[in-house]
Amino acid sequence: MLFSRAASPLEPLLPREAVLWAFRLLLGREPGAEEIETHRRHPSPEALRRALQPAAYQIPVWLLAPPASPLVPWILEPPSLARPTSQLCTAGQFDEPDYAAWCATIAETPRPHRKQWEFCWILAALRAADAIRPGARALGFGVGTEPIPAMLASHGVTVVATDAPPGVVDVQGWSETRQHSSDLSGLHRPELLDEAAFRERVSFRPVDMNAIPAGLRGFDACWSSCCFEHLGGIAAGLDFVENSLATLRPGGVAVHTTEFNLGSNDRTLETPGLSLFRRRDIEGLLERLAARGHTVWPLNLHPGDSPLDAYVDAPPYALPHFKIEAEGEVSTSIGLVVQRGA
């Protein structure tokens, strides 16, 4: 997923024995072969120790406070896929029956992976908005090779799948991730529907998310999965969410996931290739959209109450995780839902 780091051929590797003994002493188990090679890339034994036993996530007070604006609806409870709203990725959602059920609809085995959670949450939100039905029209941004277009098509939805055009791909770094599509070939899932039905219901076109074509209009729903943090900065990402509403009919829903900064409401990571959105960024966006007549679904920033929710994975991100440390910040996935006004 994001933030992966490949070791340079010139980097010295820790001894295999160091990784073996670290796992035995700190985790009480033997590492797998892939884990050994991954954790040998740490620059020192101390860095290895911190990766296996990082400091637990401490919930900041600002995360639990109500929004400053009365225009932003708010709840604070353990988030659930059975009652989707604008919410964080948490460990408890992976144990819900709905998680396994949504994984089955995309022909995937449930696993503790944030990207898979994003797919399941997006589908749960689309169902709650009655957008998964024969005759509905959906627009996907930055679809890469994700299973959502095929899943929607299998339920009779007409889908326009889009991804970045060639020039934008290189600038934003997608060509190196293997998460980019240039046509329909990587989107068909034969286990979900036959190719003839897929090609009848799904079309593809390149789209720059920073310049959405005016011809894309009248959809019942649009979505993106962890894309708009790569559009050039915080302002560009927030502008995309607002601009995506123009592709919808009145009452249509925009369903997007992105990276959320759990550690600070002040400092953050912002680069041309990756930005972590703070609570104040998200709230400011929702307040602005509500003021313009759109309906924002309630914001639920409950960070989870499972022991796994306190674990923060550190580079090189070898273990299952829901929260990660990136350039000194703690991040997880957040999903946002906005319904277009008249």
Image: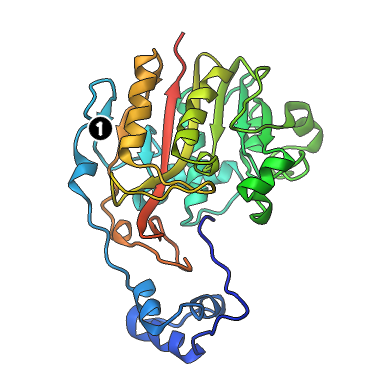
- The image shows residue 194, relative to residue 288, as above or below, that is below
Q: Nearer the viewer, residue 305 or 179?
A: 179
Which colouring convention does the figure follow? rainbow
The residue located at (20%, 33%) in the rendering is 66
Q: Hey, which quadrant is residue 53 in on the image?
A: bottom left
Residue type at tag 1: Ile
Q: Secondary structure at mark 1?
A: strand
Q: How many marks?
A: 1
**Can residue 52 be spotted in the picture?**
yes
The residue where tag 1 is placed is 75
Query: How far from the left and from the top, in percent, is residue 119?
Result: 53, 42
Query: How far from the left and from the top, in percent, is residue 335?
Result: 43, 37
Crowding near the residue tagged with mark 1, few <14, some 14–19, many ≥20 C-alpha atoms within 10 Å: some
Q: Nearer the viewer, residue 255 or 41?
A: 41
Q: Nearer the viewer, residue 328 or 138?
A: 328
Q: Hey, which quadrant is residue 164 in on the image?
A: top right
The residue located at (74%, 44%) in the rendering is 190
The residue located at (23%, 31%) in the rendering is 67
- The image shows residue 32, relative to residue 225, as above or below, that is below
- The image shows residue 3, relative to residue 98, as above or below, that is below
Q: Nearer the viewer, residue 302 or 245?
A: 245
As drawn, the residue found furthest toward the right would be 196
Query: How far from the left and from the top, in percent, is residue 283?
Result: 32, 31
The residue located at (45%, 79%) in the rendering is 43
State which quarter of the image contains the N terminus. Answer: bottom right
Query: How far from the left and from the top, in percent, is residue 105?
Result: 58, 41
As drawn, the residue found furthest toward the top would be 342
- The image shows residue 305, relative to residue 158, as above or below, that is below
**Can residue 130 be spotted in the picture?**
no
Q: Hey, which quadrant is residue 249 in on the image?
A: top right
